[in-house]
Amino acid sequence: KEVVVSGIRPTGFLHLGNYFGAMRNYVRMQNDEKFNCYFFVANWHSLTTHPDTRELQSSVHRVIAENIACGLDPDKVALYIQSDVPEIAELYLYLNMLAYKGELEKTPTFKDKVRLQPDNVNAGLLTYPVLMAADILIHRAVKVPVGKDQEQHLEIARNYADRFNHRYGEVLPAPYAFNYGGELVKIMSLDGNGKMSKSENQMNTLYLADDADLIRKKIMKAKTDQGPAEPNSVKPDYIENLFTLMRLVSTEDTVAKFEADFNASSAGNVVIRYGDMKKQLAEDMAAFMKPISEKAADIQNNKELLNRIIRQGADKARASASATLKLIRSAIGMDYS
Ligand code: TYM
């Protein structure tokens, strides 16, 4: 079977970008016989930006609960917490010897973080992609379901696998970013500026936990315009994004109707009514989110169930991780006993 790995940082509630960029693929891959899946909560990664850990434990539990509410089955996959697998930290150490400072400093995500937190440019932030490579390579994964924003990190992980194999012998396969639909997904922020993210203005991000009222408020405020001036125009990004969201949660007929309205628009005679479109989208979105947020809240309150899932996930992940680490130690020549 092909090994699949992916992780989510527990830095807040999960949003639609996380869902459609990553989690939807997790569920599809778990149900595909071809794959052996490892999904985890990247709590070490969150320390690079969130050193205050007061809320971390409940966030970690929340992410586990949301993963299950979205359809992940802890009996079919390994669902675990990064810090429960110390083998990852050992591989991180080895990979750090193959990672170069200049290269890491050029990573766009590092440059962004330096801008966002100039007072805390810690080494963990610099070596973020090294830890991420360790997460992936520890299970010898080949497919990594992620959103488009993670593509460069995957390229870096492939580099390290390659360097390791070159120096110590073929142990690590090359991992690739993956999405079922082909192209990697990027859900944009509702104001049309950049990707939807946890750190951004809360009104521009739709969280899986948002209730119907809040969803409506946010979607009705989403950026639109007067409609296309010509029939069959190319959609601006922020309009395309609304259609993307609609395709994800509405029926095909609904999407087809608004697509037709958009394409029928012509100079001075705009057919599409974005107000109606957004109302419909808000309704369908709320219907989509409700069962997920209810189920997530139930699971999060069931500490016994959560603990059982977390322990079971750690056991599965450590079995796989220690098998890889054994190969790695032996390739490096660190198997003394
Ligand atoms: P994180 O926690 O920022 O996001 C989790 C997943 O959600 C995807 N995503 C998006 N996809 C489409 N559109 C968006 N607007 C959007 N926002 C987020 C991300 O691409 C990701 O798949 N570095 C990773 C966590 C990580 C990881 C790993 C991932 C650590 N180790 C190993 C895969 C493999 C991150 O910060 O994701």
Image (tube, rainbow, N blue to C red):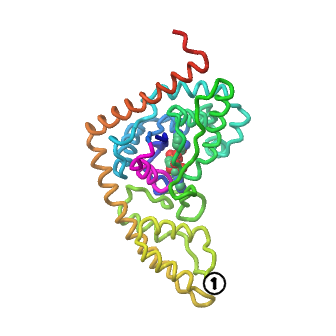
Residue sitting nearer the eye, 247 or 14: 247
Please name the amino acid that badge 1 sits on.
Ala
In-image side of 115 versus 305 (left or right): right
Q: Which residues are magenta?
A: 19-35
Q: Magenta stretch: residue 31 in it?
A: yes
> Which residue shows up at 68% across the image and 36% down it?
104
Q: Residue at x 45, y 42 (%)?
A: 10
20 or 165: nearer the viewer = 165
Above or below, 257 against 304 in this view is below
Q: Position of residue 182 (x, y in %)?
A: 56, 57
Asked whether residue 259 is drawn in magenta, I would say: no
Residue 253 percent location from the top left of the image: 42, 77
* Image quadrant assignment for residue 109: top right
Provide the residue designation for mark 1: 229
Image quarter for residue 158? top right
Please tell me whether mark 1 sits on a helix, a strand or a loop. loop
